[in-house]
Image: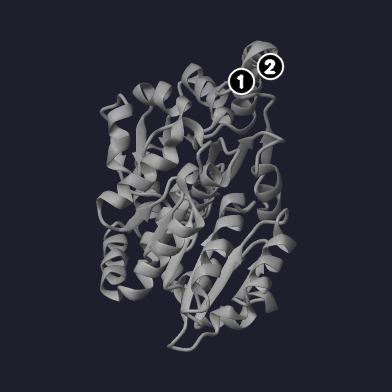
Amino acid sequence: MSVARPAKTVLFAGGGTGGHLFPGIALAEEFQRLEPDINIVFAGTERGIEARVIPEMGYPLVFLKVQGLVGVRGVKRLKALANFPKAVIQALILLVRYRPVLIVGLGGYASAPVLLAAMVAGLPWVLQEQNAYPGLVNRMLAPFADAVFIAFSKARESLKSRKIYNFGNPLRLRLQEQETTVAAELSENQRVTDSSESDFNILIVGGSQGARILNRRVPEALAILVSRYPDLKVVHQSGNADLETVKKAYAEINCQAEVTPFIDNIGVCYRAADLVICRAGALTLAELAELGKAAILVPFPFAAHDHQVFNARAFVEKGAAVMQIESELTAAGLSDEIENLITQPERREKMAQAAAELARPEARTEIVNHCLKLI
């Protein structure tokens, strides 16, 4: 009589933002694709995006009572420091409960107590760093990790480890392999993707909450151009807060624009786009590379350690994008850049090709295969 082996558990720690969380979900899915008997558990905080996303996906999620230290001062910083040992104890209890065979740190302050607990327990653990400039937790703990996975070569400069592997950022779905039929499933406010060959399609993505600067400046810039280029079509992900304001702005300039708070089938909109105007989050850049799209990048100026500027520079240096600093972004300057890319298709094509050369479509498989060797 054979005895069933207990299922192995892989614990993912961290999150807070989609940039940290979604690469973890991509890896979780790949673990289960390659090893169907592996269980997945996530650890995060009630304030992070994981609190909404992970339960919807059906993975167990454990909350830790931990606060961040970056940018926090005074009483809040003292409170965060005082609570941190308690979070480590919580994490140790979590390890006893689930007995993971591997812990994957996704970055962010929520990963720190779990990774320290893993060190105390002598369990194998790895780091996944999405950005060109690593976050504080990953910089501090990299020397002790069993492996550090990066997506930008520049990240090596800030990580003191001999176990660094540049496999790229894992994406949840191979966007190029999505069924083209999903275009028919887009909601009415996304029908701009049904375009003729003469149209010039611009996709504006400001992140899941939108970007106020893009919500303001892009309609202002297109107001300068729309009379000269009547075939301009726009899909604009605005977030909820500015939705009606952005719709009104496009209506006032008579621009063919579809404004939506969030785009579910982003692959369809990427494929239709001739130009993307967006932030410089690590996953957004991975998507641009995956589909080979020319882009104007406007890095989020309040990202920790200004890491989006470092991300953007990596693309600009390869000729895959142009960058405009938010504090210097004007309607006139943005309209000039857009017009240059409309009227110079050869330049736009070279940017798209350069972006495609940065794609790492096998990132998720390479990372998980390396992790399985550690297990």
* Residue drawn at x 62%, y 35% as measured from the top left: 43
**Mark 2 sits on what residue?**
76
* Residue drawn at x 35%, y 49% as measured from the top left: 168
- Please tell me whether mark 1 sits on a helix, a strand or a loop: loop
Residue 220 x/y as whole percent:
57, 62
* Residue drawn at x 64%, y 20% as measured from the top left: 87
| Residue in front for this viewpoint, 34 or 46 | 46
Question: Considering only vertical position in the picture, is 118 above or below 268?
Answer: above
Dot 2 crowding, Cα within 10 Å, few <14, some 14–19, many 20+: few
**Mark 1 sits on what residue?**
72
* Residue drawn at x 38%, y 73% as measured from the top left: 342
Question: How far separated are the C-alphas under marks 1 and 2?
Answer: 6 Å
Dot 1 crowding, Cα within 10 Å, few <14, some 14–19, many 20+: few
- Name the side, left or right, on which 49 lies relative to 193: right
What colour scheme has been applied to the protein in the rendered image?
A: one colour
| Residue in front for this viewpoint, 77 or 244 | 244
Residue 76 x/y as whole percent:
68, 16
| Residue in front for this viewpoint, 219 or 14 | 219
Amino acid type of the residue that numbered disc 2 sits on in the rendered structure: Lys
- Name the side, left or right, on which 319 lies relative to 234: left
Residue 341 bears which disc, if any?
Answer: none
Please indicate, yes or no, whether residue 276 appears anywhere in the rendered image: yes
Q: Quadrant of the image for the C terminus?
A: top left
Please indicate, yes or no, whether residue 34 appears anywhere in the rendered image: no
| Residue in front for this viewpoint, 58 or 240 | 240
- Name the side, left or right, on which 225 lies relative to 83: left
Whether label 1 touches label 2, CB < 8 Å:
yes
Q: Residue 129's image quarter?
A: top left
- Please tell me whether mark 2 sits on a helix, a strand or a loop: helix
Amino acid type of the residue that numbered disc 1 sits on in the rendered structure: Val
Q: Residue 93's image quarter?
A: top right
